[in-house]
Amino acid sequence: MGGTLFIDEAYRLAPEQGAGHSQDFGVEALEEIMSVMEDGNIVVIFAGYTEPMKRVFSSNAGFCRRVSHFFQFDDFTCNDLAQMVMIKMSKQNEKSRLYGFKLHPSCTPGAILKVIEKNSSEKLRNKLNGGLVDHMLNNARENLDSRLDLNSKGDELLTITLRDLEAGLKILSQRINVD
């Protein structure tokens, strides 16, 4: 009470039609959250993708009465994603899978933008949104690892190139079904 409750992927609280759950604790949790919203001073943020969230809104008649503000954010653009790559690679912490790795100087925001536009579909970008960057970078690192040989040395061992980023997106496109 008196605080904020953030529920990510809130659409999981409302079952899909025909899911066949004999006990659905999501509905029970949603009803309990709504009673707390009505009784106390609490801010509740329900976050999730637009279409599945519509199911939550329609799952309980009192939900929309208790939730007074709705915000919809646009998906990230290719330019946003390219900027995210630059930020993630420049602000790594020790727990990151990419810690110590860097981008090749040819990996400018403009060059990365072109790689993203050329090697990912709009459907893939919309499905993964910002998560596309993490997948792309992890796949790019895997590509870097696989292309190195016993003669590789120095910075070459830790430098992700445009070709690695491109391969990372191609791998991602093959792994993720967007239909």
Image (tube, rainbow, N blue to C red):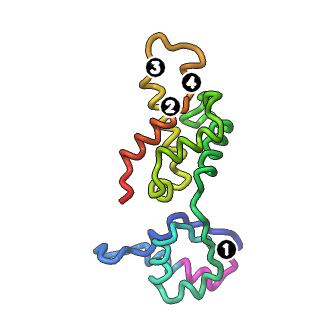
Q: Amino acid at mark 1?
A: Val
Q: Counting residues from the N terminus, which is met first, the one under dot 1 or under dot 4?
A: 1
The residue indicated by pointer 1 is 43
Q: Counting residues from the N terminus, which is met first, the one under dot 3 or under dot 1?
A: 1
Disc 4 packing (10 Å; few <14; some 14–19; many ≥20): some
> Which span is picked out in magenta?
33-42
The residue indicated by pointer 2 is 163
Q: Amino acid at mark 3?
A: Leu
Q: Quadrant of residue 27?
A: bottom left
- Say which element carries label 1: strand
What residue appears at the point 58 percent right and 51 percent down from the top-left corner? 78
Q: Nearer the viewer, mark 1 or mark 4?
A: 4
Left or right of 50: which side holds 82?
right
In the image, residue 85 above or below residue 151: below
Q: Residue 152 at what x, y percent from top left?
A: 50, 14
Q: Residue 15 at what x, y percent from top left?
A: 39, 74
Numbered mark located on residue 148 in the image:
3
Give the Cα distance between marks 3 and 2.
Answer: 13 Å
Q: Counting residues from the N terminus, which is met first, the one under dot 2 or under dot 4?
A: 4
Q: Counting residues from the N terminus, which is met first, the one under dot 2 or under dot 1?
A: 1
- Quarter of the figure that contains the C terminus: bottom left
The residue indicated by pointer 4 is 158
Left or right of 158: which side holds 142?
left
- Say which element carries label 3: loop
Q: Residue 138 at what x, y percent from top left?
A: 49, 38
Count of labels in the image? 4
Give the Cα distance between marks 1 and 4.
Answer: 44 Å
Give the Cα distance between marks 2 and 1.
Answer: 46 Å
In the image, residue 150 above or below residue 137: above
What residue appears at the point 58 percent right and 37 percent down from the top-left corner? 96
